[in-house]
Image (cartoon, rainbow, N blue to C red):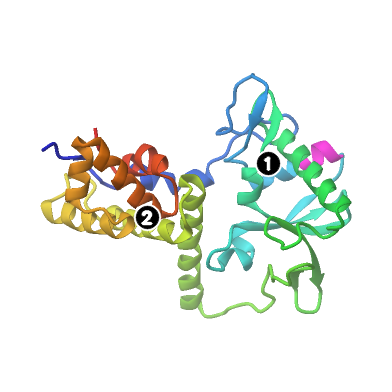
């Protein structure tokens, strides 16, 4: 029976590299391009999955002829630290004369039509969506505040809060306990990593947390040697928890198409994604090759 190969899963694992993907960017407003959405010259549908906050705001200013700017970045907003929430930033929207909170994952998912991936077209499409929302009576963003919303600032408490949702975007009370701040910072980093994995690999947030935990465990292993049998056993145990697939299931999937299809369906259900995504992206990212 053919055994599915597992490459040397060290800290250079593709999954670990994926954790830095969300922080990578390219280009800027006013004609800049963002990689990951095609980057070609053929007219069609594109996205900007690596768009940064600054590039997006620069492009808003380009298409609006205005002077919007960032008030709070994603690592400065309280809502970004809530479990299951996305990465939120707050801007002064000069075109509308108001503050807005926007989900970074949302703008990266917007589909627009152009000849290449670029943040100017992204900003234009965002404005078009916003105009449609306003025309439909949603004057303060999408109704539930899932993607973006208008926020008010309370000068007494120093808090930005959502007009629609009441979400707080900045805590006016500063934390002076250094150890508590460090713990909160690590927790926020963990959830940000999980959010990036969830978005990029299209899996549930709980599955993404498991993948981040696995990646952290791999990073803690020696990077200058092959994994030991004990390492492999520990990794296979984590993979089984994430996918509901045992080592035997994977070995059968490597030699039997029917078993493979069943295994991929099982893993997809566990991870909250599709079977094709599991086989073509997730398992290879974990170093597992079924062929």
* Side of 119 relative to 266 (left or right): right
Task: Using a 10 Å C-alpha cutoff, classify the residue at mark 1 as few (fewer than 14 neighbours), some (14 to 19) or many (20 or more).
Answer: many
Q: Name the residue under label 1.
A: 55
- Residue 141, given in percent of the width and then of the height, sits at 78, 57
In which image quadrant can residue 242 be found?
bottom left
Query: What is the tally of numbered marks visible in this picture?
Result: 2
Please name the predominant secondary structure of the magenta segment in the image.
helix
- Residue 137 against residue 288 in the figure, above or below: below
Q: Earlier in the sequence, mark 2 or mark 1?
A: 1
Residue appearing at x 21%, y 51% in the figure? 222
Q: What element carries label 1?
A: helix
Magenta region, residue range: 60-64
Marks 2 and 1 sit apart, C-alpha to C-alpha, by 29 Å
* Horizontal arrangement in the rendering, residue 80 relative to residue 261 (left or right): right
- Look at 51% across and 58% down and name the residue there: 192
The quadrant in which the N terminus is found is top left
Tag in front: 2 or 1: 2
* Residue 61 part of the magenta segment: yes
Residue 12 x, y percent position in the rendering? 31, 43
Image quadrant holding the C terminus, namely top left
Residue 211's mark?
A: 2
Asked if the stretch drawn in magenta spans residue 26, the answer is no
Of residues 71 and 145, the one drawn nearer to the viewer in this rendering: 145
């Amino acid at each position: 029976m053919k055994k599915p190969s597992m490459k040397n899963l060290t800290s250079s694992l593709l999954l670990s590299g994926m954790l830095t993907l969300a922080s990578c960017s390219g280009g800027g407003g006013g004609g800049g391009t963002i990689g990951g959405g095609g980057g070609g010259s053929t007219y069609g549908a594109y996205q900007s999955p690596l768009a940064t906050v600054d590039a997006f705001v620069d492009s808003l200013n380009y298409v609006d002829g205005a002077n919007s700017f960032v008030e709070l970045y994603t690592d400065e907003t309280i809502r970004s630290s809530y479990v299951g929430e996305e990465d939120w930033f707050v801007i002064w929207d000069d075109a509308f004369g108001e503050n807005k909170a926007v989900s970074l994952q949302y703008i990266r998912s917007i589909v627009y039509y152009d000849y290449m991936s670029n943040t100017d077209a992204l900003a234009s499409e965002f404005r078009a969506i916003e105009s449609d929302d306003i025309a439909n009576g949603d004057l303060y963003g999408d109704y539930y505040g899932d993607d973006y919303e208008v926020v008010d600032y309370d000068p007494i408490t120093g808090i930005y809060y959502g007009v629609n949702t009441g979400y707080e975007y900045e805590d006016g009370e500063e934390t002076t306990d250094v150890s508590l701040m460090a713990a909160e910072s690590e927790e926020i980093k963990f959830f940000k990593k999980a959010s990036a994995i969830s978005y990029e690999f299209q899996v549930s947030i709980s599955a993404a947390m498991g993948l981040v935990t696995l990646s952290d465990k791999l990073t803690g292993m020696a990077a200058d040697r092959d994994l030991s049998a004990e390492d492999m056993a520990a990794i296979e145990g984590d993979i089984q928890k994430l996918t509901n697939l045992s080592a035997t299931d994977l070995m059968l999937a490597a030699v039997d198409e029917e078993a493979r299809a069943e295994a991929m369906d099982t893993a997809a259900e566990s991870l909250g994604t599709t079977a094709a995504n599991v086989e073509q992206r997730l398992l290879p990212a974990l170093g597992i090759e079924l062929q």
